[in-house]
Image (cartoon, helix red, strand yellow):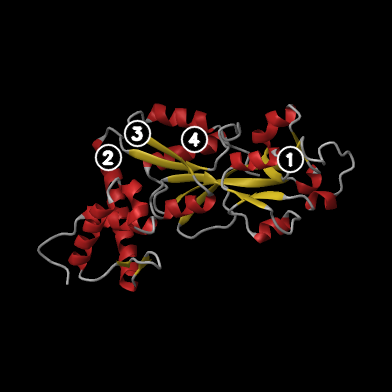
């Protein structure tokens, strides 16, 4: 039974949530900047407070108990409300300080359509006391970060809508299928669609089989987590792969890359801004939204 004469220590909840996210004590060491013994003490204290076991550890790995799973949802909800309260208090103080956490996909810095460096500059000029935490995350990680209040706002390509999120369409990013000058197709003037689909394809880890089929491929032969890794494999000459036009432009001009059958394999990725429902009117989020819309006006179609 919970002790009515003593409030729960918020630090215990923060440690618990981090341990779950990192799937164990060892994984949470860096995130929490604590030793495993210190984390173990925190967890023991929390379990003593609530009166039941939250997680199990052993050779089979880390696993939440059924009660631990239920407690996790409430802990995340409480920490989210505390974070929101702190953000609101910062605004009320009048100095408009605090931290604004934003995530984008990788390889967007050279995209003049988005012009993220310019947007950050304008945001910083309005709120010089705000600490900006800019992260590179995959679409899935962005959505989870917004839902868990680890992020305030995210910009990326989100194939399907998610409940409890507000989405604002911004622009469309052009992608082409590229091969490098080391690939046999580079000098071929009469490339067929069948020749292209028989090449080894490198894709992002979050692409599904449906994404591949939609683009005419049955499977991929390599998977990467970042655009830089994708470009590396393409430049090896052993793979073809999709890249944003702005990202590949200089290498194409220097004859290191060539787009393959643009009319058959080109596509546009719609980029959107997302934030958590109920937070869109917060000052920092509203300001960033306005800057993004102004920068990309007329480019969402």
The secondary structure type at the circle numbered 4 is: helix
Report helix, strand or loop for mark 2. helix
Q: Is residue 68 left or right of residue 153?
A: left
Residue furthest out toward the right: 190
Indicate which label's residue lies in the foreground, 1 or 4. 1
Q: Please identify, in this view, whether the residue under mark 3 or under mark 1 is nearer the observer.
A: 1
Mark nearer the N terminus (1 vs 4): 1
Residue position for label 3: 130
Q: Is residue 51 above or below residue 149?
A: below
Label 4 sits on residue: 291
N-term-proximal mark, 4 vs 2: 2
**Residue 90, numbered label:** 2
The structure residue drawn at horizontal position 69% and vertical position 54%, both measured from the top left corner, is 220
Mark 1 or 2 closer to N-term?
2
Give the Cα distance between marks 2 and 3: 10 Å
Task: Between label 1 and label 2, give the one nearer the viewer.
Answer: 1
Q: CA distance from mark 1 to mark 4?
A: 40 Å
Taking the image as shown, residue 22 lies to the left or right of residue 269, namely left
Check the picture and name the quadrant holding the N terminus. bottom left
Is residue 174 among what the camera can see? no
Lower sequence index among marks 3 and 4: 3
Q: Secondary structure at mark 1?
A: loop
Q: Quadrant of residue 299?
A: top right
The one nearer the camera, 297 or 251, is 251
- In the rendered image, residue 43, in percent from the top left (x then y), is placed at 24, 60
Label 1 and label 2: CA atoms lie apart by 53 Å
Whole-percent x and y of residue 121?
Answer: 46, 27
Q: Nearer the viewer, residue 175 or 34?
A: 34
**What is the secondary structure assignment of the residue under circle 3?**
loop
- Which residue has dot 1 on it? 237
Sequence-earlier tag: 3 or 1: 3
In the rendered view of the protein, which quadrant contains the C terminus?
Answer: top right
């Amino acid at each position: 039974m919970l002790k009515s004469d003593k409030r729960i220590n918020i630090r215990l909840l923060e440690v618990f949530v981090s341990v779950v996210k990192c799937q164990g004590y060892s994984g949470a060491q860096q995130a929490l900047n604590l030793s495993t013994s210190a984390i173990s003490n925190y967890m023991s204290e929390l379990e003593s407070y609530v009166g039941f076991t939250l997680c199990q550890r052993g050779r089979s790995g880390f696993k939440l108990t059924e009660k631990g799973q239920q407690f996790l949802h409430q802990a995340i909800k409480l920490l989210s409300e505390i974070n929101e309260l702190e953000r609101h208090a910062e605004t009320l103080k009048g100095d408009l300080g605090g931290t604004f956490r934003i995530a984008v996909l990788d390889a967007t810095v050279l995209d003049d359509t988005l012009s993220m460096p310019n947007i950050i500059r304008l945001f910083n000029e309005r709120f010089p006391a705000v600490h900006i935490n800019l992260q590179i995350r995959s679409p899935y990680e962005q959505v989870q970060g917004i839902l868990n209040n680890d992020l305030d706002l995210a910009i990326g390509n989100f194939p399907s809508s998610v409940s409890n999120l507000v989405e604002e369409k911004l622009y469309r990013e052009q992608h082409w299928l590229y091969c490098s000058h080391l690939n046999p197709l580079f000098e071929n003037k009469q490339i067929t669609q069948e020749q292209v689909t028989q090449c080894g394809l490198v894709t992002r880890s979050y692409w599904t089989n449906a994404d591949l089929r939609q683009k005419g491929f049955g499977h991929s032969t390599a998977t990467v987590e970042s655009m830089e890794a994708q470009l590396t494999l393409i430049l090896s000459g052993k793979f073809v792969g999709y890249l944003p036009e702005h990202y590949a432009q200089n290498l194409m001009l220097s004859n290191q890359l060539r787009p393959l059958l643009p009319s058959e394999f080109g596509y546009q990725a719609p980029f959107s801004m997302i934030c958590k429902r109920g937070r869109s009117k917060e000052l920092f989020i509203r300001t960033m939204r306005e800057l993004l819309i102004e920068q990309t006006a007329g480019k969402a179609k």
